[in-house]
Image (cartoon, helix red, strand yellow):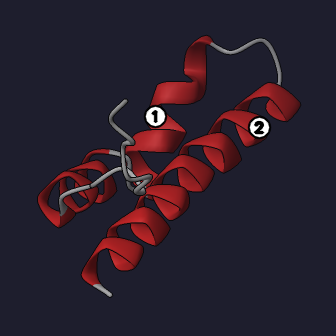
């Protein structure tokens, strides 16, 4: 039986920089026009930022 080593997933920093450029505040504000209300728009913006932050943490762990 082969035991696989558990590792965090690798996230390339190029991907993170791309997401930061694509989902900057200006684009997030423009993209929320199709959402039903301001609470949904704020939730969307926070969600996008949370995904980017978590990917940054995974990229940092891989560098260590």
Closer to us: 64 or 39: 64
Q: Where is residue 11 in the image (x, y as percent from the top left)?
A: 27, 55
Q: Residue at x 37, y 29 (%)?
A: 1
**Secondary structure beneath label 2:** helix
Instruction: Specify whether 40 is left or right of 30.
Output: right
Residue density around tag 2, few if under 14, some if 14–19, many if 20 or more, within 10 Å: few
Vertical side of 16 occupied by 31: above or below: above
Where is residue 8 drawn, in percent x and y?
Answer: 42, 56
- Mark 1 vs 2: CB contact within 8 A: no
User: Which of the two labelled residues, at mark 1 and mark 2, occupies the earlier sequence position?
Assistant: 1
Q: Which residue is more in the foreground, 5 or 58?
A: 5
Q: In which quarter of the image is residue 34?
A: top right
Checking the image for residue 43, the label placed there is: 2
Mark 1 residue crowding within 10 angstroms, few (<14) / some (14–19) / many (20+): few
Is residue 11 toward the left or the right of residue 33 in the image? left
Question: Which residue in the structure is indicated by mark 1?
Answer: 30
Q: Eyeballing the image, is 60 above or below 24?
A: below
> How far apart are the two marked residues, 1 and 2, measured between alpha carbons?
14 Å
How many numbered marks, from 0 up?
Answer: 2
Closer to the observer: label 1 or label 2? 2
- Helix, strand, or loop for circle 1? helix
């Amino acid at each position: 039986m082969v035991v696989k080593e558990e590792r965090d997933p690798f996230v390339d920093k190029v991907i993170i920089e791309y997401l930061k450029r694509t989902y900057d505040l200006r684009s997030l504000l423009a993209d929320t026009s199709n959402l039903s209300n301001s609470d949904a728009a704020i939730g969307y913006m926070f969600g996008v930022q949370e995904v980017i932050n978590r990917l940054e943490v995974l990229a940092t762990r891989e560098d260590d």
